Image (spheres, rainbow, N blue to C red):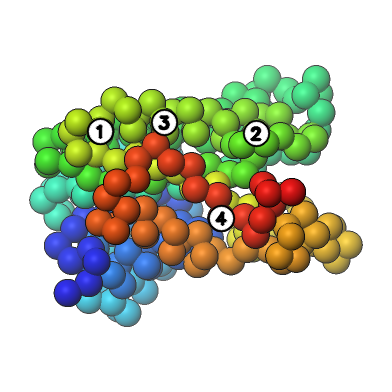
Amino acid sequence: MTRFDGTTAIVTGGGSGIGEHTARTLATDGANVVIADVDSENGEATTAEIVDETDSDATFVDVDVTNDDDVEGMVETALEEYGGLDIAVNNAGIGSKLEPTAAVSESDWQRTIDVNLTGVWRCLRSEIDAMVEDDGGAIVNTASILGRVGTQGAPAYTASKHGVLGLTKVAALDYASEDIRVNAVCPGYIDTPMLEEAGLYEDEATVEQLRELHPQGRLGEPQEIADAIAWLCSDEASFATGEAMAIDGGYLSR
């Protein structure tokens, strides 16, 4: 027996980075996984690898978390394919351009909030409805160290991740009596494609600056976040809800 035998999980942003590692970890531990992503190539590849390499099943769904129909269809897929929903990891998110608060365009602001915050709320709404019908479950939202502190030049991203933590706490309170646990993780800077897409790997000096922000002197690995998420989803964390767990190499302790 493994930790998640007989369970069904959804992972948004499951095609790469933290989401991919989380989906693989849950599947290795016995969960059937619905992988949701806007990147169908990476999502389908991850799904196929899970099916080939583990004893679990996996299904890919093309999901934009800003679209109600996509999100509802994601949850319906879990219910139709596997008969229920036990675990949800709301990990889909985007970065934002580095620019001061007054320089951010309204369209960039709204896009970041729509994906990173409203997208999490939209997923929670559908997932919680399914879990209430299925006698409970565990949900983990991916926030950030920037959900707990600020940094110059990232107003929309920082606001969105602060919002995720507030939303996590309220959802945890609202559904504790339904045996639904809702927690969040707050990763530091993690070595994922998102950092590369943000242009932070363009020169070694920038990468070294990122490393030095963490007292451990390095970037985090996606698997380190995936392991924390899996623990929060497991029965080992049965008394944890409303928590914002930092996995950040000491960043927030400075």
- Nearer to us of marks 4 and 2 is 4
Q: Earlier in the sequence, mark 4 or mark 3?
A: 3
Q: 156 left or right of 137?
A: right
Q: Report, in whole angstroms, how far the alpha carbon at label 2 lies from the one at label 3.
A: 17 Å
Mark 1 is on which residue type? Ala
Mark 2–mark 1 Cα distance, whole angstroms, equals 27 Å
- Which of disc 3 and disc 2 is earlier in sequence? 2
Return the disc, 3 or 1, that comes first in the chain's sequence.
Answer: 3
The residue type indicated by label 3 comes to Lys
Q: Residue at x 41, y 61 (%)?
A: 22
Q: Secondary structure at mark 2?
A: helix
Instruction: Give the residue at mark 1.
Output: 176
Identify the mark nearer the N-term, 4 or 2: 2
**Which residue corresponds to mark 2?**
158
Estimate how packed mark 3 is, as few (under 14), some (14 to 19) or many (20 or more) residues with alpha carbons within 10 Å.
Answer: some
In the rendered image, residue 126, in percent from the top left (x then y), is placed at 27, 33
Identify the mark nearer the N-term, 2 or 1: 2
- Which label is found at residue 169? 3
Q: Are marks 1 and 4 in contact (CB under 8 Å)?
A: no
Please report contact status of discs 4 and 3: CB closer than 8 Å, yes or no.
no
